[in-house]
Image (tube, rainbow, N blue to C red):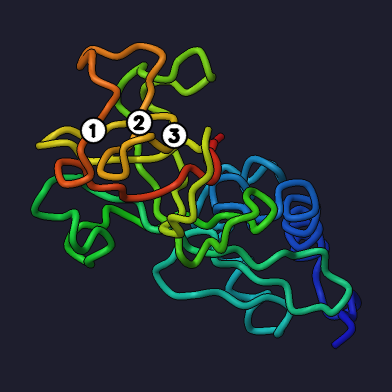
């Protein structure tokens, strides 16, 4: 379907162009607030009104109740459809068996497929809490994307659960078949060798999600 800009008003064209420019640069659609900033429209209600009319004219589509859900209908669009990746509320022995249970999901984040080589539909997001790998650039508050695909190689960064503590560590095979090595740069546990029965590997680091 080719978009006929003659059916749009000047404001509608401006908003449509702003959306398309945003997704060309970021790979995900903008929020209502971001659209308002791009086109100089301070009132969210006014932006919603323009989006409603664009949807009525069939040039965009949206998912009800979901942020960053705008899709451009034109076949010439540069839009890359995002994957919606769940952010976890907590990691505990109780939630470890079913991390992405609906009751353990805080929200869903729209992530461009370009962010990671991992299959995003099999990923989850954790807001990280310590500086155990700070020398690798991972800081408290970072939004980390983990893949549940646990085909691991030495040097992969993994999310693990030890007792009631979530750990971010470099994974290495051990000479002992019943153990694994999990190394940190700043390790308050002072423990690297773990028995496989006392540790649960939950995911492999696939990327970092930055919000602007």
As helix, strand or loop, the secondary structure at mark 1 comes to strand
> Would you say the residues marked 3 and 1 are in contact, meaning their CB atoms lie under 8 Å apart?
no
Q: Is residue 25 visible?
A: yes
Which numbered tag is attached to residue 194? Answer: 1
- Distance, label 2 to label 1, CA atoms, is 6 Å
The relative height of residue 84 versus residue 178 in the rendered view (above or below) is: below
Depth check: 21 or 191 in front? 191
For the N terminus, the quadrant is bottom right
Quadrant in the picture for residue 190: top left
Q: Within 10 angstroms of label 3, few (less than 14), some, or many (20 or more) residues?
A: some
Q: Quick one: 31 or 193, which is closer to the camera?
A: 193
User: Mark 2 — residue?
Assistant: 181
Neighbour tally class for label 2: few under 14, some 14-19, many 20 plus, Cα within 10 Å: many
Quote the CA–CA distance across marks 3 and 1.
11 Å
Which quarter of the figure has residue 128?
A: top left
- The residue at 31%/44% (across/down) is 177
As measured in the structure, the alpha-carbon distance from the residue carrying label 3 to the one carrying label 2 is 5 Å
Marks 1 and 2: in contact by CB < 8 Å?
A: yes
Q: Residue at x 82, y 64 (%)?
A: 78
User: Are dots 3 and 2 in contact, CB under 8 Å?
Assistant: yes
Q: As rendered, which of 190 and 137 lies closer to the eye? A: 190
| Residue at which label 3 appears | 172
Q: Please tell me whether residue 157 is drawn above or below residue 119 in the rendered image.
A: above
Residue 134 in the figure: left or right of residue 198:
right
């Amino acid at each position: 379907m080719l978009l006929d800009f003659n059916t749009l008003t000047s404001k509608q064209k401006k908003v449509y162009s702003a959306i398309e420019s945003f997704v060309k640069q970021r790979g995900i659609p903008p929020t209502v607030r971001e659209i308002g900033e791009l086109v100089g429209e301070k009132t969210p209600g006014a932006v919603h009104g323009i989006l409603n009319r664009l949807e009525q004219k069939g040039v965009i589509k949206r998912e009800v109740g979901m942020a960053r859900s705008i899709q451009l209908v034109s076949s010439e669009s540069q839009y890359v459809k995002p994957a919606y990746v769940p952010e976890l509320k907590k990691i505990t022995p109780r939630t470890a068996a079913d991390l992405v249970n609906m009751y353990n999901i805080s929200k869903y984040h729209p992530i461009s497929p370009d962010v990671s080589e991992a299959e995003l539909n099999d990923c989850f997001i954790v807001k990280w809490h310590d500086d155990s790998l700070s020398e690798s650039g991972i800081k408290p508050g970072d939004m980390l994307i983990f893949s549940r695909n646990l085909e691991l190689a030495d040097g992969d960064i993994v999310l693990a659960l030890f007792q009631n503590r979530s750990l971010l560590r470099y994974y290495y095979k051990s000479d002992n078949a019943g153990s694994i090595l999990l190394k940190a740069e700043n390790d308050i546990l002072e423990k690297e060798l773990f028995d496989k029965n006392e540790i649960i590997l939950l995911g492999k680091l696939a990327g970092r999600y930055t919000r602007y």
